[in-house]
Amino acid sequence: MATPYSIQTGEAKTLGVSDFLVCGASLAFTLGIGLAFAIKSRKSQDPSEFLVAGRSMGVLPVTLSLVVTFISALTLLGLPTETYIHSTMFWWLALAMLVAVAGSAHIFNPVLHNLGITSAYEMFYLGSVLYAPSLALKTFSGLDMWVSILSVGCLVTLYTSVGGMKAVLWTDSFQAVIILVGLLSVVIQGSIVVGGFGRAWEVASQHSRINFQEFSVDPRTRLSFWSVVVGGGTTWMAYYSVNQCQIQRVFACPSLKEAQMAMWLNGLGLAVVVSLCCMIGVLLFAFYEECDPLQFNLVGRTDELVPLFVMDILGHLPGLPGIFLSCVFSGCLSTLSSGINALSGVLLQDFIRPHCARNISSITATVITKLSAAVCGFACIGLAFLAGNFGNMLQLSYIIMSVFDGPVFGVFILGMFFPRANKWGAICGYMASLAFTTWISVGAYVNGVTGPRLPLSVHGCNWNVTNTTMPTTTLPHTASPEEDNYLSIYRLSFLYYTASGAIVNVTVGVVVSLITGYWHPVSTDPELITPIVNYLYKCRQKKPDNTAAVREIHGTSTELV
């Protein structure tokens, strides 16, 4: 017979010894893969072996690595909570992912496959990624946050800094299996507990959680079909097109065709993961239909709801909660290892070599890359301690990505779609876009802009085991745009941040380029222009004699980041 649930006892369950053993074995195996590749490649003096695995990886490991880099702990904990609090509108993200992959694989990757790009903002995002599983472990076991942050941060820093890209790709492949097993175990057991997924769907539908019909074109609508598919699709297109974490995996493929195949398979994998996470959200709501753990004071943050749910439904089965905890940590490790490896490449290729040591040897470059990976890892640990001061972790991750990805994405659109664009247009467009996205995001945060929340019940909680009385449940009030005492633009959906930043960048960049370069036409290397523009405008296919100069002008786009 199953033990009583937390909403009946007033206390959250904690992990057992078997769960810690399962999770520990998973982490140990991950570390073993990293150390194995470190030993295997200890004599290698080529930094490209560390950064892009010598461009020799197959489609399968690259595909799995692309998938799990997206599946951070923020996704595993945040997407189900989004469904629990709001609705299933975020499920449209599965379609948005396919839109993003199509644009990235066939518009941007053909140009970028032979170019290096940079990304300097990744550290802030990685800090929030490390915080999320630490929060889960705190909920599971009661351990202090700093124990989890330090242990996981040191583990991923160690195997990434010594093992390089091959270690990252193969550990990601192992972690993909762990994540799939973890998600399926929660979906299957959750369905059994609530009486079948069909019943969970019916319960969620009765309380307005099943909603795919929000088609408002108002950009202030937090989640609509257009904001998720268009805004979210643009956000992830930027992430897969100009973000170092993803591009470095694409570079690990020996050819563009294989890279594009990996991207498409990755898109299908992401759609499956998004669907599983949203299904968990439906089950989560059905299980806590009559007792919201937040109002019952079982948890202090929305990001702790999924760990609590897992312990409730799997806590009586030794080892299974440990599998899900391994799933959460796998999502964290995959994203962190990808980011740390990418940041080390950025520091070497775009800061150290151009500005500090142009003629360093390959062995020196390899040592610098490994040391910089370690430094980046410890910096992420420090930033993880700050992430807990912010709100919804899923929304926070999107905002961090968008504020910086939008301007960067705009620079690449400007360079690839507008042959007359010059470095002054790129610089001015980038700065204007960065100022705009920062202003919008900071303004929304300072003014406490939030979306509407659906009502949650507490009538089924066992208030006899607590020292508090049952609160009155009412629909949370959300001010209409007319009632706002701040600028209406602050209500812009966070999913539009990347798209709006890119639009500002391109608009300013084109205008400035025309003003500063109208009388100085340039001859642009077709390799730097996306194939669709070359086709539509019939750009000159013969390379000009001043290729180096043109690359320097358009290369400014990649040096700004």
Image (cartoon, rainbow, N blue to C red):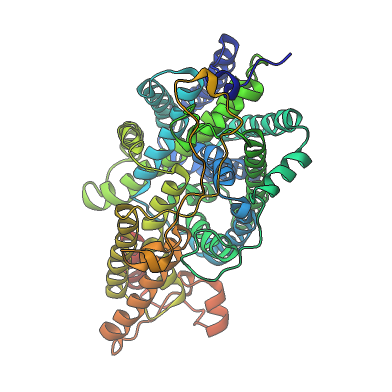
Which residue is drawn at the image coordinates 37% and 72% (left, top)? 504
The one nearer the camera, 68 or 353, is 68
The quarter of the picture where the N terminus appears is top right
Residue for point 50% across, 82% down:
539
Residue 249 located left or right of residue 350? right
Instruction: Examine the rendered structure and indicate whether residue 497 appears above or below residue 129.
Output: below
* Residue 490 x, y percent position in the rendering: 36, 63
Specify the quadrant of the image occupied by residue 79. Answer: top right
Measured as percent of width and height from the top left, residue 105 is found at 58, 60
Q: Residue at 31% across / 64% down in the picture?
A: 486
Q: Is residue 205 visible?
A: yes
Q: Give x and y (percent) for residue 149.
A: 38, 26
Residue farthest to the left?
A: 356
Residue 298 vertical position relative to residue 549 in the rendered view, above or below: above
Quadrant location, the C terminus: bottom left
311 relative to 34 in the view: left or right: right
- State the image coordinates of residue 310 (x, y, percent, origin top left): 61, 27
Q: Nearer the viewer, residue 495 or 444?
A: 444
User: Would you say residue 11 is visible in this rendering?
Assistant: no
Relative to 217, say whether 269 is above or below.
above
Extreme-bottom residue of the structure: 519
User: Which residue reaches farthest top?
Assistant: 17
**Total tally of numbered discs in the picture:** 0
